[in-house]
Image (cartoon, rainbow, N blue to C red):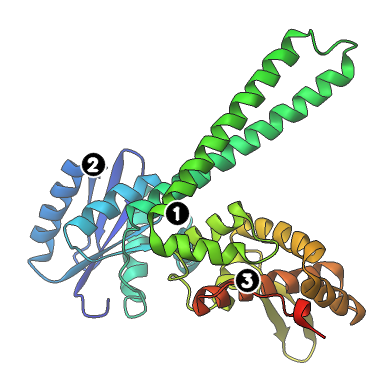
Amino acid sequence: MKNYEEVVGIDVSKKTIDASCHLAQQHRVFTNDVKGYKSMLNWVIKQTKGVSVFYCFENTGNYSLKLASYLSLKGIAYVEESPIKIKRSSGLVREKTDKIDSELIARYAWVYREELISSEVKSIVYQELGRLIGLRDQLVRSRAGLLGTLKEIEQLLSSPSTDTSCIVLRRSIENLGKQIKSIESRMDSLLKEDESLSSNYKLLLSLRGIGFVVACQLLYHTENFKGFDTWRKFSSYCGLAPYEYSSGTSIHRRKKCHYLGDRKMKSLLSMASISAIQHDPELRMYYKRKLEEGKPKMIALNNVRNKLLARAFSVVKRGTPYVVLNQYAA
């Protein structure tokens, strides 16, 4: 974005957007809808006097999706950045308002304009897949909560089969189960509709430890393995990559994973790794070898998680299913 002469920082909220021109030092509030977007573009043209402009705003989920879709439809350059990056680059900030936030976003975009890359809206398939994944997670958590409540009530009653509370809870749990299956069916249909997604999905299932949920999450978060060049970058994104911590001659701590990362993916890969250790002879031997080297169990498990990611990226890049070599050993 280094060739642009001005940047507009936008703080997006549910009903309004605050826009600030960095060099022109102008600020204005617009509604978070198509009418507001049109007014903002006309206002920016007047303030910047026709110079090349790009827009920058934080990724706030559904709130910023409408703005990103509109700018993309109009062919206007924009950067949708992670909120944590902007916050960490802002320095010491004592006051917080929407106006100040938009000015900080504009300043961030201008300072780092040579490093920023123009963003693109995900395709309709990925948007729907992401919504279905999020909804399924919510329903699974709700069902787990009801199952826990049902179990507690049953322990207190002598005849739980006739208790009204238990009957209602069982019906709710059964209904949630049906809704979850319906969502999974739709997710499966989405994967089959796209040839590339369907092919990579089948390749991922050839890995022991990776099932339907983990495969869908991997395809969504990696944008069908196009959003990350290597498995190491995705490992860092998930919070699985160990980093060095040292200073001078006195501070030399062991390498450890950073606390920032996608906790959902990290949790899913942990469960996938535990399953892989149980059912994959190669990974089980690999895990035991790490333990014999004196590594703690969690570090050994993290090694398995990274090994599983490396295999996932390899089978997709190679385009062939994973083959367990031990079964062909003499």
Q: Is residue 112 above or below residue 12?
A: below
Q: Position of residue 239 (x, y in %)?
A: 63, 67
Spatial distance from mark 1 to mark 2, Cα to Cα? 31 Å
Q: Is residue 222 visible?
A: no
Q: Is residue 5 visible?
A: yes
Q: Nearer the viewer, mark 3 or mark 2?
A: 3
- Name which residue lies at 60% across and 29% down: 176
Say which label, 1 or 2, has the lower sequence index.
2
Determine which residue is flagged by label 3. Answer: 309
Q: Position of residue 157 (x, y in %)?
A: 87, 13
Say which label, 1 or 3, has the lower sequence index.
1
Q: Nearer the viewer, mark 1 or mark 3?
A: 1
- Name which residue lies at 16% across and 41% down: 35
Dot 1: few (<14), some (14–19), or many (≥20) neighbours within 10 Å? many
Q: Is residue 319 above or below residue 69?
A: below
Dot 3: few (<14), some (14–19), or many (≥20) neighbours within 10 Å? some
Q: Is residue 272 above or below residue 4?
A: above
Mark 1 secondary-structure assignment: helix
Query: Who is closer to the viewer here, 130 or 201?
Result: 201
Query: Which corner quadrant holds the N terminus?
Result: bottom left
Q: Position of residue 159 (x, y in %)?
A: 86, 10
Determine which residue is flagged by label 1. Answer: 191
- Name which residue lies at 74% across and 74% down: 303
Query: Which corner quadrant holds the C terminus?
Result: bottom right
Q: Position of residue 311 (x, y in %)?
A: 63, 74
| Residue placed furthest toward the bottom | 249
Determine which residue is flagged by label 2. Answer: 33
Which amino acid lies under the numbered mark 3 shown in the image of this protein?
Leu
Mark 3 secondary-structure assignment: helix
Spatial distance from mark 3 to mark 2, Cα to Cα? 40 Å
